[in-house]
Image (cartoon, rainbow, N blue to C red):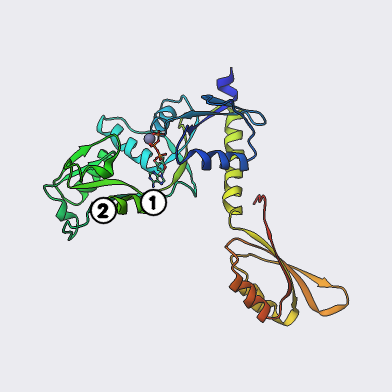
Amino acid sequence: MDKDTRLKLAVQKSGRLTDPSIDLLTRCGLKLARGKDQLLAFGENMPLDVLFVRDDDIPDLVQEDVCDLGLVGLNVIEEKRLALAARGIVASFDSLRLLDFGRCRLSIALPQQSPWSGPASLDGKRIATTYPNLLAQYLARHGVRAQIVTLSGAVEIAPRLGRADAICDLVSTGSTLAANHLVEVETVLESHAVLIRTPVALAPVKTEWVERLLMRVDGVQQVKESKYIMLHAPRSALAQIRQLLPGSESPTIIPLEGHPDRVAVHAVCRETVFWETLESLKRAGASAVLVLPVEKMLA
Ligand code: ATP
Ligand code: ZN
C-alpha cells in the first residue's frame, strides 16, 4: 500500500554527499523524522521517505525499483551504466536534475617525475582505480593499451606501494594528490551530484510529488546566489542602472513621493552581487541601496 503512495529516495548514508543532500531536501521543505543511525527516515510533511545507503548501491536501488529516486554522483552513475552494459544490461535510471553540489572530477594522475606527453604516455602502464569501466572507456577512446588495476580504495598510495604507475581517481581540490606527490594530467569525467529516478511509471500521487519536488529543487538552486536589490535612482540613469544589475530581468520601477525625477528600483539578481557592482551603481547615481537575501523562489 505504502509503496504506491509514498516516494522512496536513496541518499548516501555517511559521506561527502550526505549533508548537501539533506540540506537540499530540507530547503525543499521536507521534515524528516530520523532516529540516530536509522536506515529509513520518514518524511513527516511529504509522502517521501529517505533511505540511507552506501552511494555505490544507489543506482542499483533505483534500477531495481526499490527506490523511486536517488541522489548520487554522476561518477557513480556512469561507472554503473558501463558496468551494466558490459553484462548486456541497459541501465534504466533517468537523470532528472544536475545539482550544484558534489563537484569533482575523475582524473588521471602520475607521480611527479613521470614524463607526460598526452594519453599515449600511458601505453603499457599499470593504472590503479576504483572506476575500471570509466577508465577502460577513456583508454579505448584514446587507443591506449594499459593495465587497469582495480582497487576498492586508497588508490592514491598505489604508485608509492609499487602497485601502479598512475592512478585514475576523484579529485576536487587536488590537495590529496599533492600530498601523495602526484600530478593531475587528464580529466576523464567532470562530475557533480544528480537526482535520478526509476523509469518505471509511478502512481499519479507519486508522479505529482516528483513534479513538486523538482519545482522546489529548481527554486532552491536558483535562489542560492540570488539577491533582491532595492535602490533609489534618478530617472535619467535608469538605463545604465538596469545594465549594472547582474542577471536581473525586468525590475520594478516605483515613483517616489515628492521626487518626480527619482524612482525606486526593485530587482531580483540571479548572479552574485559584488561590492564592485554596488560601487558602480552608486557612481551611476543610485542611493539607499539595499541587498537582501532571497529565501524562496517559484518561477
Ligand atoms: P560510501 O561509503 O557511501 O561508499 P565513498 O567513500 O564511496 O562512500 P565519498 O568519498 O563520501 O564516498 O564520496 C561520495 C561522492 O562524493 C563521490 O562519489 C563523488 O561523486 C563526490 N565527491 C566530491 N568530491 C570528491 C572528492 N574530492 N573525492 C571523492 N569524491 C568526491
Ligand atoms: Zn562509495
Considering only order in the chain, which callout, 2 or 1, is on the residue closer to the N terminus?
Answer: 1
Q: Quadrant of the N terminus?
A: top right
Residue in the foreground of this view, choosing between 9 and 122:
122
Residue 272: x percent and y percent? Answer: 57, 63
The reply to whether discs 1 and 2 touch (Cβ–Cβ < 8 Å) is no
Residue type beneath disc 2: His
- Foreground label between 1 and 2: 2
Circle 1 residue: 172
Asked whether mark 1 lies closer than 8 Å to ligand 1, one says: yes
Is any part of residue 153 visible from this angle? yes
Q: Residue at x 19, y 55 (%)?
A: 119
Kindly report the distance in space between the C-alpha atoms of the residues bearing marks 1 and 2. Answer: 16 Å
Q: Residue at x 61, y 34 (%)?
A: 209
Residue 150 falls left or right of residue 256? left
Residue in the foreground of this view, choosing between 217 and 166:
166
| Image vertical order of residue 33 relative to residue 272, above or below | above
**How busy is the neighbourhood of tag 2: few (under 14 within 10 Å), some, or many (20 plus)?**
some
Q: Secondary structure at mark 2?
A: loop
Residue 63: x percent and y percent? Answer: 41, 29
Residue type beneath disc 1: Ser
Q: Secondary structure at mark 1?
A: loop
Residue closest to the far left:
124
Is any part of residue 188 visible from this angle? no
| Image vertical order of residue 213 relative to residue 111, above or below | above
Q: Residue at x 61, y 53 (%)?
A: 223
Disc marking residue 181 = 2
Residue 197: x percent and y percent? Answer: 48, 34
Asked whether mark 2 lies closer than 8 Å to ligand 1, one says: no
